[in-house]
Image (spheres, grey):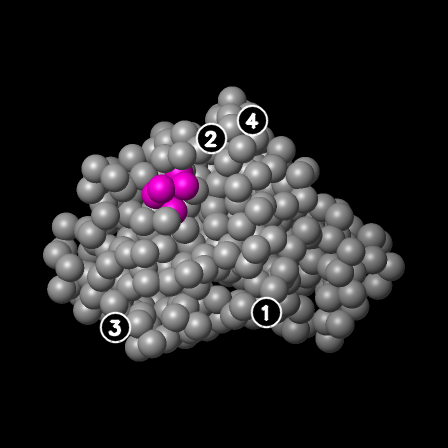
Amino acid sequence: MEYRKLPKGDEQIGVIGFGTSAIGSAGECEIEATAALAVENGVNYFDLASADAAPFAAIGRAVAGGRDRVHFQVHFGADYSSGKYGWSLDRDVIRRSVDWQLNALKTDYIDFGFIHCIDEEADLEQVISHGILDDILRLKEEGVVRHIGLSSHTPAVVQKVLNMGILDMLMFSINPAYDYRHGEYAIGSVDERMALYRRCEAEGVGISVMKAFAGGQLLNAATSPFRRALTEYQCIQYALDKPGVLTVLPGVRNREDLRRVLGFLNASPAERDYSVLGTFAPQDAEGVCVYCNHCQPCPAGLDVGLINKYYDLAQAGDELAGNHYDALEKKASDCIGCGHCDRRCPFHVVQTQRMQEIAAYFGK
């Protein structure tokens, strides 16, 4: 497993997490076995926005005795009183649901307590006016909730919550379809979505990624909005390359799914390479560096993707980005202008010009 550190904490989070949205129908024995297999393979981040109630007790049993080695992402607003997933903004319903989830998981604390599925500003207002946010903040003060998070599909709503300064983690839908304006949750322009990812990294808010495969649509040419299929590994790498992202949460259905997804960790760079996107992404994605490093290897030894990322983050207000840039062995000023990266960039970024711009910005 590869791990990334939570900026506002000491937690090391596996880049492949455990999504529970699709596993409920597998039966409790298979759920428990899949969760146990996940822990054995270093998976330590579990999202509990499940489609039904079945996974909670099974996962609780699977991690018994090793609770301190896993992180639970629990949602304040998900209701399982019917046995199936429901969504509520009723304060009492949410309190009962969270108590039930804790009991089923056999734990007395929540690593990441999430304001759940807030896609409209009106819903955010209700979370505040109904006292739901106050409850989460109180539980954090009491140590029951370790970190506060938000799940949303709407950049503008996330920006409002970021302005409140309470978030340590964001659960957001990141995939090429949504980022390039295709699909039900393709909310916000390419620039708006990238600006959100950069702000999260600049302000130390980690991102856990939902819907990395766009509900499976991207994996099938017949359903992909690009009329071309991507692989799971390409989608995972695409999400992990976005600023702020700590973990991707595939919705596995059983052990077979989990083993296949974990294969990403041993996949070759060619298997992870999503540069094919440049052949069918929309026009407004052209000229934007997505840090895919398809331009590598650089004859002068520059890490072109990382140089671009630090520049973008510095412009987004990340005070540490300049320090990270200074620590690079090769900087933008070392570009020899050979044009190798320009010819290889699938998104048609003129990196030789970009390197001059970055060198002028940082003064080196």
> Along the polypeptide, which appears first: circle 3 or circle 1?
1
> Along the polypeptide, which appears first: circle 4 or circle 2?
2
Q: Which mark is residue 10?
A: 1
Mark 1 and mark 4 in contact (Cβ < 8 Å)? no
Which residue: 53% across, 41% down? 135
Element at badge 2? Answer: loop
Main SS of the magenta segment?
A: helix
**Relative to 274, does residue 161 appear above or below in the rendering?**
above
Mark 4 → mark 3, Cα distance in angstroms: 42 Å
> Along the polypeptide, which appears first: circle 1 or circle 2?
1
Residues 100 and 298: in front is 100
**Magenta stretch contains residue 303:** no
Query: Between tags 4 and 1, which lies in front?
Result: 4
Residues 176 and 36: in front is 36
**Magenta stretch contains residue 95:** yes
Question: Is 309 positioned to the left or the right of 94 in the image?
Answer: right
Q: Residue tagged by mark 3?
A: 37
> Along the polypeptide, which appears first: circle 4 or circle 3?
3
Residues 67 and 306: in front is 67
Q: Magenta stretch: give its range.
A: 94-98
Return the x and y of residue 349 as percentages of the image width and height. 60, 48
Q: Quadrant of residue 305?
A: bottom right
Q: Of the residues shown, which amino acid type is indicated by label 1?
A: Asp
**Mark 2 burial class by Cα count in 10 Å: few <14, some 14-19, many 20+:** some
Q: Residue tagged by mark 2?
A: 119
Q: Of the residues shown, which amino acid type is indicated by label 4?
A: Ser
Toward the right, the furthest residue is 363
Q: Of the residues shown, which amino acid type is indicated by label 2?
A: Asp
